Image (cartoon, rainbow, N blue to C red):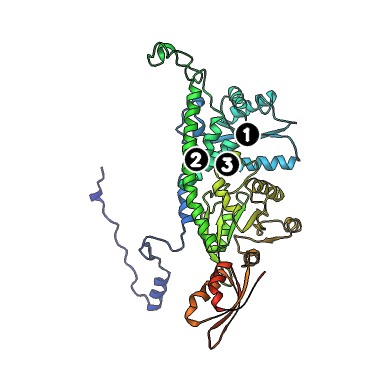
Amino acid sequence: MTHAHEHRPDPVTPVDTDISLDDALLETEEWESGYDDEPTDGTDPEETTGDYDLAERHALRRVAGLSTELEDISEVEYRQLRLERVVLVGVWTDGSVADAENSMAELALLAETAGSQVLDALYQRRQSPDPATYIGRGKVDGLREIVQATGADTVICDGELAPSQLRNLEDRVKVKVVDRTALILDIFAQHAKSREGQAQVELAQLSYMKQRLRGWGGNLSRQAGGRVAGGAGIGGRGPGETKIETDRRRINTKIAKLRRELAHMRTTRDTKRSERRRHQVPSVAIAGYTNAGKSSLLNRLTDAGVLVEDALFATLDPTTRRTTTSDGRVYTMSDTVGFVRHLPHQLVEAFRSTLEEVADSDLVLHVVDGSHPDPEGQLAAVREVFAEIGADKVPELVVINKADAADPMVLSRLRAREPHSVVVSAKTGEGIAEALAAVEADLPHPGVAIEALLPYERGDLLNRIHVSGEVESVEHTGDGSLVRGRVHEGLAGELEPYLVTSGRS
């Protein structure tokens, strides 16, 4: 046996020590230390909070083949979705073949974002989904054969299924069946980080589950009556409360508690919003389809450093950043949760307080992916949600993103369809200057035109005009600074002693 202390080093080979000074300096320049030469404060100056979030998310990726779930599929509950090896199923009721394929491609992206591996997909043309099995008896047999051949453990349907459809499909296919709504809720549950976001997701999940409570066999219809009812005897006998009624009552109690918590959290958001209104700070909301590049655009416009990932619903928690126009006016820019076709109603209700950021903003940057196969469909889907949350009256600037990957013909078509739009690439920086100029032009303008002679000791008022108003010209005279521009009414009242002329428009 060889021991560590018995190891003898190899003989040292003599080296040529006759090296010139120039060669030594050259070798020194090319040599790299194995240690970190950066400042030892523990942080990389180039890393942002978004980089840390992305690293944390990648560290929690599911690895195929390492599942510890029970093999008996009936033991898996809805809130523990097994999305590892999946088969996609869709029903095509209207539109073209391209629309059906786009919808299935989006469902595949949703499944991959949730951490699953898509094995196969099938869809069929029907006038309407089958009320019993969603896809019809014949397709169910074909689906079962595909599941057995591929070894899939989950089937994902591109639609919202009724409880009876879910049960019938699972009874025939013998694996877990998940609909589109449950899939989106699962992604939201993975990606929500803030306390408010997690509460909103839980509220949406409970609202979804409440209508789909069911058990295996008859365990949800068990009743406690007679002597079973706690030994109550006379007066305590009767049908009692079934298991499904108990579960529904507990869910309703939890929903009520979550709504109270969200109402309390909403006051904080309303307070911040009222402060911005009091100081007349305009707000811009970045909204649009999921994965259109909203977070990338916010990073490019404001150096926000939020998480960016090529995945659907990568960021859920809204981020607000303070920025300034070229002439010094302060305004805020907020990133919001992305939208998708057939966004579950439970999510719209649960995220209503967050989505109100869009409805209460002064300008909406509607971001659309110019490289997507159906950008017009994205615009229509987002505007449908705008109408539902009351944001359809807010001024809108369409930002056609990903110009570096888009077809120029598609960009021309979109520009013709949306006259008030700009084309940008958040990745390369193309068009960002034009987008900023368009945002500044669309911001609300202060309503009071002023011409004021400010004494030099009132530099604070001059600064406030720069921050919250529009300065047309500043002329420094012997008596003070002669300022011409526009301000809001509150500041106009403070400037009144120094006004030369004033007017409203």
**Residue 193 visible in rendering:** no
Mark 2 vs mark 3: in front: 2
**Three-letter code for the amino acid on which mark 2 is drawn:** Arg
Disc 1 and disc 3: Cα gap in Å? 17 Å
User: Alpha-carbon distance for marks 2 and 3?
Assistant: 11 Å
Mark 1 lies on residue: 160
Q: Which mark is residue 349?
A: 3
Q: Quadrant of the N terminus?
A: top left
Looking at marks 2 and 3 on the same chain, the residue that comes earlier in the sequence is marked by 2
The answer to which of 464 and 20 lies nearer the viewer is: 464
Please provide percent x and percent y for residue 6. 23, 50
- The residue sitting at the front extreme is 497
Q: Nearer the viewer, residue 235 or 11?
A: 235
Residue at (75% x, 37% y) in the render = 94
Are the two marked residues, 2 and 1, in contact with CB atoms closer than 8 angstroms? no
How many discs mark residues in the rendered view?
A: 3
| Residue drawn at x 58%, y 22% as measured from the top left | 171
- Amino acid at pointer 3: Glu
Q: Name the front one of labels 1 and 3.
A: 3
Closer to the observer: label 2 or label 1?
2
Query: What numbered label is drawn on residue 259?
Result: 2
Residue 499 visible to an observer of this rendering: yes
Q: Residue 37 appears in which quarter of the rendering? A: bottom left
Residue 178 picture location, percent across and down: 58, 32
Where 243 sits versus 206, above or below?
A: above
Q: Secondary structure at mark 3?
A: helix
* 1 or 3: tag closer to the N-terminus: 1
Where is 283 relative to 55, above or below?
A: below
Rendered location of residue 306, percent (x, y): 51, 56
| Residue 317 vertical position relative to residue 178 in the rendered view, above or below | below
Q: Amino acid at mark 1?
A: Glu
* Crowd around label 1: few <14 · some 14–19 · many ≥20 (10 Å): some
